[in-house]
Image (cartoon, helix red, strand yellow):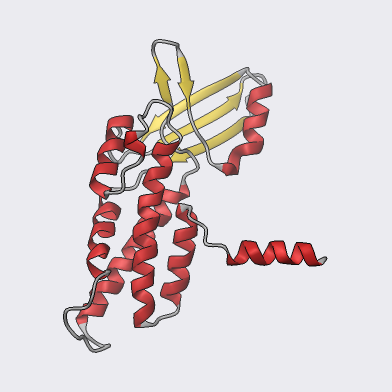
Amino acid sequence: MRTNETLALLEFLLSYGVSSKDYLFRAKELIAEDRIESLFYAAFEIRCGIEARMNEYLEVQKHISEKKKRGWKISQIAKNIEDAFRLGEKKAIIQIVDSKSNEPVLSAEYTPVRKIGRKIAEQLGNYLHQAKSFYPNDSDHWVHFKKLLNTGIEELEFSTSGSLLGPPIYNSKTNDCFMYLDDRHQDKLKYLQSSPQIIFKVDYE
């Protein structure tokens, strides 16, 4: 490998990514270290990951004001998402089929940040301050902390498992439907743009 390619790879590996999946990856790595001090850094990563995922849903939406895209409080972001989507904790599942061949072209899901994940993100913030008491390593305090972290990981994994950044949004005035996908489907999007004859299905569960 040439020197410039090596440097580019090192820069990528050492960079601090700020997507929800970057936070999730680092949180899992920190918990795997199985050290008390690593738990606090994992709590930070999970808290930021959940906030990042919620903002990723809002950032791409054209019908949301810029003011609502700049929030940082979990409860306020959740309210803005509900105002935008009106889905609660339901998933939105889309399937696109080629109308000529009847072959599936794309399948994607919107997986929300659920209430339990938001609650844990807020609770983890309580651990990111000076410790008020000493707890030995075998204390139930750490057992509870690890349980919160593991549930936070599960919730962040769920919300990042979907590749649809919000449910399809229909504009009744223009008769247009908008949906936003992450980078996993860029090749499919190019296909859809060149093949307008499709069947579009949406389910909520």
Q: Give 102 or 42, whichever is nearer the viewer.
A: 42
- Say which quadrant the N terminus sits in: bottom right
Q: Is residue 95 above or below residue 197?
A: below
In the picture shown, does residue 164 fall above or below 6? above
Q: Position of residue 73 (x, y in %)?
A: 26, 49
Residue 169 is situated, as x and y percent measured from the top left of the image, at 41, 25
Asked which quadrant contains residue 31, the reply is: bottom left
Q: Is residue 101 visible?
A: no
| Image coordinates for residue 190, horizontal then vertical, percent | 66, 30
Question: Residue furthest toward the left?
Answer: 133
Q: Residue at x 64, y 24 (%)?
A: 193
Quarter of the image where one finds residue 42: bottom left
Q: Is residue 36 above or below residue 113?
A: below
Q: Dividing the picture into quarters, in which one does residue 202 lie? A: top left
Q: Nearer the viewer, residue 18 or 27?
A: 18
Q: Is residue 187 visible to the viewer in this orientation of the structure?
A: yes
Residue under the image location 58 percent in, 43 percent down: 183
The one nearer the camera, 7 or 175, is 7
Count how many numbered circles sit on residues in the image: 0
Q: What residue sits 44% from the left and 11% below the top?
A: 174
Q: In the drawing, does residue 153 fall left or right of residue 195?
A: left
Picture quarter with the C terminus: top left
The residue lying toward the viewer, choosing from 113 and 57, is: 57
User: In the figure, is residue 60 to the left or right of 122?
Assistant: right
x and y percentages locating residue 189 in the rendered image: 62, 31
